[in-house]
Image (cartoon, rainbow, N blue to C red):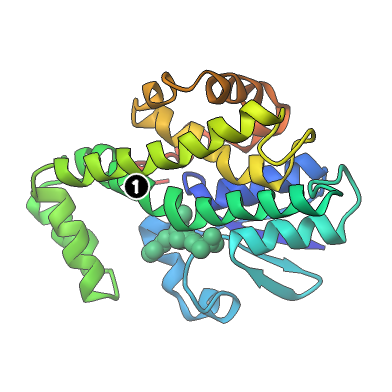
Amino acid sequence: MLELYHYGDSLCSMKARLCLLEKGVAFVSRFVDLMKWEHLTDDYKSLNPNSVVPTIVHDGVPIIESTVINQYVDEVFDGPKLTPEDPVDRAKMRVFCKMQDDILHPAIQKPTFNLLVKPQLSKKSDDELDEWLSTHPLEKSRKLFQGAARGPVNNEALEEAKTQFNFVFNRMEEALTETEWLSGSTYSLADIACAPILDRLGQCEWLDLFSPFPKLSSWGEKIREREAFKAMRPKDKQRLGNWDN
Ligand SMILES: N[C@@H](CCC(=O)N[C@@H](CS)C(=O)NCC(=O)O)C(=O)O
């Protein structure tokens, strides 16, 4: 029995969902509503002490960190192998997974907050905002959301994010000039780690960042056609900003 604790519109949850779907592993979905702070409850923290999604629980054992989760799923379950045989390709795969964790994920938070969360939060009246934030257990996060709701768009942060995306996209273009997929001739955990960015860039209307990169653009087309990618995308009611789902 495998349970996936996840949120619809979370990049790391998408990564874990995509891997499970590509492998054809059945799972029980446990939705953790980040907008109702369900990831901060003691019950959830007993599974994931970092208080973030995703987490899988396999036969009662929790496994955390989306990259580690995907490696575990690939090692433990049958289905298409998502780790290349060749050690050099495996090393490339791990570098892309690391770049997704270290660069793409922090970078995407900037447009996510400024372009998706802020416009939704700004629609709340002062009373609605106060009421919602009063339920948050952490002072630091309350301030962050308050700033997102009422402060201006941080254009400097958006430019920084674009620079970081360009850095990684150049590396992806180089890799895709040499091989069909990011870490060799077969689709791997590297492609799975980077694929969800396509969904979020689309939401932010930033897909033109791919335009200078022809190989990356065709990689994006191929990813979008995959059934697992289509199935992994959050349903409309699970999109960020659907505060009442
Ligand atoms: N390194 C972690 C990062 C997980 C993470 O930051 N998840 C976000 C959603 S994409 C989250 O749960 N955020 C809630 C919060 O920070 O309060 C992983 O890859 O699993």
Tell me the quadrant of the picture where the N terminus can be found. bottom right
Residue 140, quarter of the rendered image: bottom left
The type of residue carrying mark 1 is: Trp
Q: Where is residue 218 in the image (x, y as percent from the top left)?
A: 59, 19
Q: Position of residue 77 (x, y in %)?
A: 87, 56
Is disc 1 placed on a helix, strand or loop?
Answer: loop
Q: Is 205 on the left or on the right of 149, as rendered?
A: right
Q: Decide: is 59 above or below 227.
A: below
Query: Total of numbered circles in the picture?
Result: 1
Which residue occupies 54% across, 39% down? Answer: 196
Q: Is 229 on the left or on the right of 141, as rendered?
A: right
Which residue occupies 73% across, 59% down? Answer: 71
Q: Is 234 on the left or on the right of 93, as rendered?
A: left
**Mark 1 C-beta to ligand 1 under 8 Å:** no
Which residue occupies 48% across, 49% down? Answer: 10
Q: Where is residue 3 in the image (x, y as percent from the top left)?
A: 71, 61
Looking at the image, which is closer to me, 76 or 45?
76
Q: Is residue 7 visible from the viewing direction of this image?
A: no
Which residue occupies 70% across, 47% down? Answer: 189
Q: Decide: is 186 above or below 164.
A: above
Q: Mark 1 points at which residue?
A: 243
Q: Where is residue 157 in the image (x, y as percent from the top left)?
A: 21, 47
